Image (tube, rainbow, N blue to C red):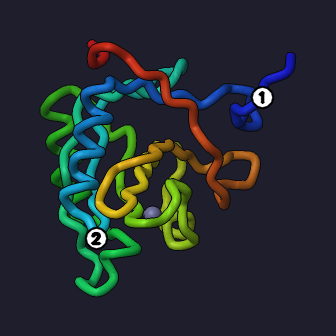
Amino acid sequence: MAVTGISQGMSGVIEMLYISQELILQIKSKAERAYPNECCGFIFGSLKNSGKYAEYIAASTNSSAADEQYHRFIITPDAMMNAERFARSNGWDIVGFYHSHPDCPAVPSEFDTANALPVYSYIIVSAVKGKAEALLSWELDRETDYTQFQSETIILTKENYK
Ligand SMILES: [Zn+2]
């Protein structure tokens, strides 16, 4: 079976992220407000065999140095722990992270790749001159021992997954 334009992991499972148009618009709006810096935040939802189902997003502080925020984001372990607690209290998991690339394509930087964790979805939105444009999702590739990103298919849903 030919699958074109879709990356497949070693298991043959196609990576999928189910997310509503509303959440996509929220992420784009945060990218535009943070411009010319990078915005960043969490994607909460459920992790299932068939893919990840986004339910909710929440912003995080970009903890990289002020003069580095135009091209990188850092989420501290404390912020991560608080987000984990928030997820648990709502019956969710953290399924991924979003961030913006001011005036750069929506593809992971070397810094992103070096700091990424397996399984999570990484949504990147390109903000060109302050306007959110391309938005793509990425996941570390098992086949490369999680050293490279592969693109992840985004399935737009009308409503959040219940
Ligand atoms: Zn990045």
Residue picked out by circle 2 = 36
Q: Which residue in the rendered view is the most extreme toward the right? A: 1
User: 139 above or below 20?
Assistant: below
Residue type marked 1: Thr
User: Which residue sits at x=47%, y=29%?
Assistant: 17
Residue picked out by circle 1 = 4
Q: Where's residue 25, x and y in %?
A: 27, 36
CB at mark 1 closer than 8 A to ligand 1? Answer: no
Q: Where's residue 15, x and y in %?
A: 59, 31
Answer left or right for 9 relative to 75: right
Answer left or right for 26 relative to 154: left
User: Which residue sits at x=70%, y=36%?
Assistant: 7
| Kind of element beneath mark 1 | loop
Residue type marked 2: Pro
| Kind of element beneath mark 2 | loop
- Crowding at label 2, few (<14), some or many (≥20) Cα neighbours within 10 Å? some
Single out the mark in the foreground, 1 or 2.
2
